[in-house]
Amino acid sequence: MIQFKDKLRLVSFLVVITGLAVLLFFQLEMTITGFLGAVTLYILNKSWLDFFTRKKKWNKFVVIALLMFFDALVLLIPLGLISYVLGPRLIDLYENNDIYLTGLKEIAYKIYSRTGLNFLSKDNLEKIPALVSSFIPDLLGSASNLVTNIGIMFLILYYMLKSSDNMSKAISNLLPLSQDNIDKIGYNTKSIVKSYAIGIPVLAFSQGFVATIGYYIFKIDDPILWGFLTGVCSIIPVVGSALIVVPLVTYLFVGGDTGAAIGLALYAVFLIMNIDNLLRMFLLEAFADIHPLITLFGVIVGVQLFGFLGLIFGPLLISYFILLVKIFISEFNGKPSST
């Protein structure tokens, strides 16, 4: 039986550990995104590392170098394209926001004259220049922070891959659960991370590419930019690419190009918005069976906590919560948990 003195020492020790953990978390908060990115890449690379080092008997450091080089290409090429597409346009928006504001006023007036709906009030229009002026510096600051986190991510990833054999054992020893439930946590983590780390970029690129073709066909100004924004918005649950398509269709309609508006609307309904279902047929293993509400609330929570990577780790947190509740019932009520 544990004596009172021993309990007091135990509680004091736990308080000290918790306090240090909280202190470290707040001091290293800016590196959390890099750490989570490293975890994501580790999960995606672990099976390849085992395959080449254990089955093919390749040198471990050579395999790690090749995997990290491939990861860098996969990450940096899209980031470079994003910078190429958005960079000049953001600078132009910042320097010529008065011209764009005039265009917005004309669009708002056309919508009002044809539908009677006043989407942009005078007060909202007057606030736009100030929002643009504050948004651009914040975006540049986020880009600088992203570069730092990418460096941290690859540094952590290297040591995780280097110590991959010991990591699994250490995690198993730390978790106070049966081996069966530890295996379930590992399986769910892999399936969810793969679903979001592979599925989200593939869906976003595919919808953005198909949308860009449609915008070329129906003569939307700057189709590459709008295609890119459509791909980004496709990540958002429920509304998705409609956030871009609906305003563009409305713009064509109020501009008097009714035929193009109807054509783009049909193109979006039958092609852009059905890419998701089509890809799931061919990439079934890349998508975990995750309820849409978990995705929706996970994205809301995750983006606030982790930024862009919250698209992956937000749903993962909610899925973990549900899984841990099932495991708790299994561990303490003697009922088998289901995944």
Image (cartoon, helix red, strand yellow):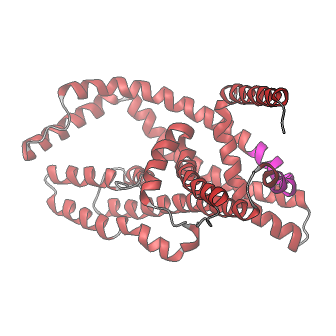
Rendered image quadrant of residue 29 = top right
- Tell me the quadrant of the picture where the C terminus can be found: bottom right
- Total numbered circles: 0
- The image position of residue 6, as x and y in percent, is 84, 30
In this rendering, would 322 be left or right of 148? left
Residue 235 shows in the view: no
Q: Main secondary structure of the magenta part?
A: helix
User: Relative to residue 61, is residue 157 depicted above or below?
Assistant: above
The one of 245 and 81 positioned closer to us in this rendering: 245
In this rendering, would 274 be left or right of 43? left
Q: Name the residue: 86% across, 58% down.
A: 165
Residue 319 shows in the view: yes
| Residue 213 is a magenta residue | no
Rendered image quadrant of residue 216 = bottom left
Q: Name the residue: 67% across, 41% down.
A: 34
- The image position of residue 263, as x and y in percent, is 23, 66
Instruction: Magenta stretch: give its range.
Output: 154-170
| Residue 158 is a magenta residue | yes
What residue occupies the far front of the structure in this picture? 1
- The image position of residue 245, as x and y in percent, is 30, 55
Q: Name the residue: 58% across, 47% down.
A: 79
- Tell me the quadrant of the picture where the N terminus can be found: top right
In this rendering, would 301 be left or right of 268? right
The one of 246 and 19 positioned closer to us in this rendering: 19
Q: Name the residue: 20% across, 51% down.
A: 250
What residue occupies the far bottom of the structure in this picture? 281
